[in-house]
């Protein structure tokens, strides 16, 4: 099963858009204007399609900014903390996220793909 293809199909149905409008680097909220109800629908569809019980906080990086705020108060490395908290994301993606925080919601299609593939292992 091709995770990227399946996920694109799901999002395409939820948002009523063409699959060609998204790639791995597409921001789900910034570019596709997904809202919390769309993410809930996506979560349910992922659970059904992939037979996985997902943690929306981890899959959709919902608590990322809270994680960073709490870590900053403790004097811990943000990068190392995020690597431990989101093991499905590699170092380069964590670095990209940390640089991109001021741009708005950082969730990309590739983050959800990485999460699904991580759970399937």
Image (cartoon, helix red, strand yellow):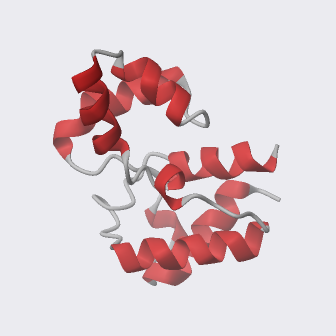
Q: Quadrant of residue 6?
A: bottom right
Q: Is residue 51 left or right of residue 19?
A: right
Q: Position of residue 92 (x, y in %)?
A: 47, 22
Q: How many marks?
A: 0
Determine the residue positioned at 56% across, 27% down. Answer: 90
Looking at the picture, tell me which residue is in the foreground, 26 or 51: 51
Residue at screen point 39% across, 60% down: 28
Whether residue 87 is situated above or below residue 15 in the rendered picture: above
- Residue 104, horizontal then vertical, whole percent: 21, 49
Does residue 34 lie above or below 2 as drawn?
A: below
Q: Residue at x 71, y 43 (%)?
A: 118
Quick one: quadrant of the C terminus?
top right
Which of 114 and 44 lies nearest the eye of the viewer? 44
Measuring from the top left, give residue 7's x and y in whole percent. 62, 64
Height in image: 117 above or below 15?
A: above
| Residue at the extreme front | 74
The residue sitting at 19% across, 43% down in the picture is 103
Residue 70 sits above or below residue 39 on the image: above
Q: Position of residue 43 (x, y in %)?
A: 57, 70
Instruction: Name the quadrant of the N terminus.
Output: bottom right
Residue 4: quadrant of the picture = bottom right
Say which of 5 and 107 sits in front: 107
């Amino acid at each position: 099963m091709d995770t990227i293809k399946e996920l694109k199909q799901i999002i395409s149905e939820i948002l009523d858009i063409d699959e060609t409008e998204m790639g791995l680097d597409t921001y789900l909220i910034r570019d596709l204007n997904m809202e919390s109800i769309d993410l809930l629908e996506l979560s349910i569809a992922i659970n059904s399609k992939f037979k996985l019980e997902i943690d929306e906080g981890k899959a959709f990086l919902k608590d990322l900014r809270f994680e960073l705020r709490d870590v900053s108060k403790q004097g811990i490395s943000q990068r190392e903390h995020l690597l431990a908290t989101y093991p499905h994301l590699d170092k380069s993606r964590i670095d990209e996220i940390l640089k991109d925080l001021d741009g708005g919601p950082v969730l990309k299609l590739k983050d959800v793909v990485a999460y699904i593939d991580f759970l399937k292992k």
